[in-house]
Amino acid sequence: MQTTKVTPVLKRTLGSFKLWGIAVGLVISGEYFGWSYGWAQAGTLGFLITALVIAAMYCAFIFSFTELTTSIPHAGGPFAYAYRAFGPTGGFVAGFATLVEFVFAPPAIAMAIGAYLNVQFPSIEPKWVAVGAYLVFMVLNILGVSIAATFELLVTLLAIFELLVFMGVVAPGFEMSNFIHGGWAGSDTFSPAAFSGIFAAIPFAIWFFLAIEGASMAAEEAKDPQRTIPKAFIGGILTLTVLALGVMLFAGGVGDWTKLSNINDPLPQAMKLIVGSNSGWLHMLVWLGLFGLIASFHGIIMGYSRQIFALARAGYLPKRLASVNARFQTPHLGIIAGGVVGIAAIFSDSLIVIGGQPLTANIVTMSVFGAIVMYIISMAALFKLRRSEPNLIRPFRAPLYPFAPALALVLAVVCLIAMIYYNTLLFLIFAAMMLLAYAWFRLTHQARTDAAEDLQLRGLRPLPAKSGK
């Protein structure tokens, strides 16, 4: 008797507002820490140039990426678009790159949460706080996407409120002379030497926006994705661009920005220059600032679990990882698997040193490598699908096509080249990981043959998205 293959499915519960919360929440920790290291490379003015170029790349990318997400609303996100455009090997490249981005970023954020609480409570071991964060938010994600998305929306709104409070409190002390002093990598005047810092600062500008595309992985859980996803993505990228530029300008104009360029808490330190160390505003920023880290950490767990689920369902990872919890209808084993990798990275932090830096200092750059590779193949997939599937239903079409996706593609390639130049060893490790993963891909062909047929991957016929509840 022949057994019918059943494709595991997820429950559609998310509207535009919750999707917007996921898109912004995935990224918003990048407004709180990490970006200020770009000042150490390029200075305030040099990094402003870098950030504006990267913001333009992300705006062009998201407006173009939204066409793919609404045309192929699939939990695999970039994996599904590349598969549809370039076949199984294209799907592998995009899927692996996305997995690196989303599995490698959470341990760094978890360690930041641990370090953050360690400042307030020195007796607490940061690593155990990081592990505790994983356990709490893995459980929350398993309990259901609606609960997880509601929590994500709440902490995202609190994080945005706190960034606005920061800008409002420090605004009276803002002086443009502070911001531009030594703004070209320590010099008051621009020179060709500043270009080196501008390019070296690229990963820190990307950190402002990294992972916003993860909201696409909730496409199978979105109500009416053709309508809700464009609103979420476009609203999300505009929100993040305004916040990123506002935070960077106000923090750099309140005093000596060089004192903020090599620390993990630039916003509290900038506010301290204005209100002093005992102000209630400062204490509120320190405590509520934790919500920015939590929002991104929680959202990225949601993102990596859907990517693992989609890859396993298609036969790229062990089939068991595509299991959906019968009660909560969430990919519980995918959530746990990514958590195991992240917790292992946390405890390997002091054991694995690359380029003189601990593991968690390097995995942020590693996740950016994954993101940039994914951006490139996603834009290539958009161009390919416009040619190969002209009749594909496209509820949202990329504006300014082909110029917007071409801009995103070219800038992503430039970013990748610059990152390889400045992070050669990490890129070689990334390439070695991809080769090992490709060997697995080649050895597991039968798993993809045996996988339940996914019409959105094969492109056999357009699938109208359900708006069920």
Image (cartoon, helix red, strand yellow):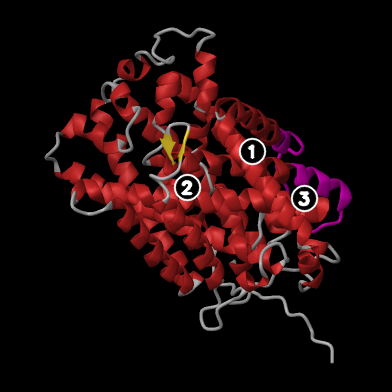
The residue nearer to you, when weighing 176 against 147, is 147
The structure residue drawn at horizontal position 61% and vertical position 70%, both measured from the top left corner, is 321
Residue identifier under label 3: 90
Position in image of residue 29 (x %, y %): 41, 46
**Residue 189 position (above or below residue 263):** above
In the image, residue 169 above or below residue 197: below
Specify the quadrant of the image occupied by residue 304. Answer: bottom right
Residue 18: % across, % down: 49, 62
Question: Going by the image, does 151 lie left or right of 207?
Answer: left
Label 2: few (<14), some (14–19) or many (≥20) C-alpha neighbours in 10 Å: many
Residue 60 marker? 1
In this view, the residue in front, 311 or 468, is: 311
What is the crowding at mark 1: few (fewer than 14 residues within 10 Å), some, or many (at least 20)? many
| Label 1 close to label 2 by CB (< 8 Å) | no
As measured in the structure, the alpha-carbon distance from the residue carrying label 3 to the one carrying label 2 is 26 Å
| Mark closest to the chain's N terminus, 1 or 2 | 2
Does label 1 or label 3 sit earlier along the sequence? Answer: 1
Give the residue displayed 49% in from the left and 19% down from the top: 197
Q: Work out whether mark 3 precedes mark 2 in sequence or the reverse, and give the earlier one.
A: 2
Report the residue marked by disc 2: 27
Tell whether position 385 is magenta: yes
Q: Of tags 1 and 3, which is closer to the observer?
A: 3
Q: Secondary structure at mark 3?
A: helix
Magenta stretch in the rendered image? 380-406
- Give 220 or 40, whichever is nearer the viewer: 40
Residue type at tag 2: Val
Amino acid carrying label 3: it is Gly
Residue 420 seen in render: yes
Query: Who's the residue at 49% across and 55% down the image?
Result: 300
Tag 1: amino acid: Ala
